[in-house]
Image (cartoon, rainbow, N blue to C red):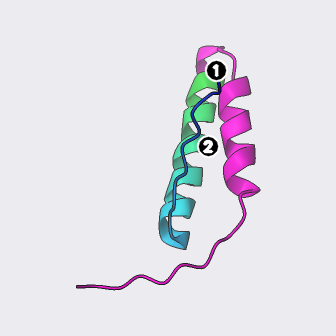
Amino acid sequence: MREKKNHLYVDSQERSILLHSLVELKNQLIQQGRYTVCVDELIFKVVNAPIKRMKIEYV
């Protein structure tokens, strides 16, 4: 069975907040002496995610 993929569409401000939060989480994990591999992978995915232009229509 295939694994379900989720797509997240964020603007530039939300993206910067997301990256900042992930870096803070990574720093907390380092202070606790825990592994940060999964957070590193998420940071890598957010940084390298393609930018898609979308037109938003307000009703």
- At horizontal 64% and vertical 20% (from top left) the residue drawn is 1
The answer to if 32 sits in the magenta stretch is: yes
**Residue 1: numbered disc:** 1
Which amino acid type corresponds to the residue marked 1 in the rendered image? Answer: Met
The answer to if 33 sits in the magenta stretch is: yes
Place residue 42 in its image quadrant.
Answer: top right
Q: How many marks?
A: 2
- At horizontal 50% and vertical 63% (from top left) the residue drawn is 10
Percent position of residue 18, x then y = 52, 52
- At horizontal 48% and vertical 84% (from top left) the residue drawn is 55
Report the span colored magenta. 31-59
Place residue 43 in its image quadrant.
Answer: top right
Q: Nearer the viewer, residue 37 or 6?
A: 6
The C terminus - image quarter:
bottom left
Q: Is residue 14 above or below residue 32?
A: below
**Earlier-in-chain disc, 1 versus 2:** 1
Which type of secondary structure does the marked residue at label 1 adopt?
A: loop
Q: Is residue 7 above or below residue 41?
A: below
Q: Dot 2 corresponds to which residue?
A: 23
Q: Residue furthest front?
A: 1
| Cβ atoms at labels 1 and 2 below 8 Å apart | no
Q: Is residue 44 above or below residue 53?
A: above
From the viewer's perspective, tell me whether residue 40 is left or right of residue 7: right
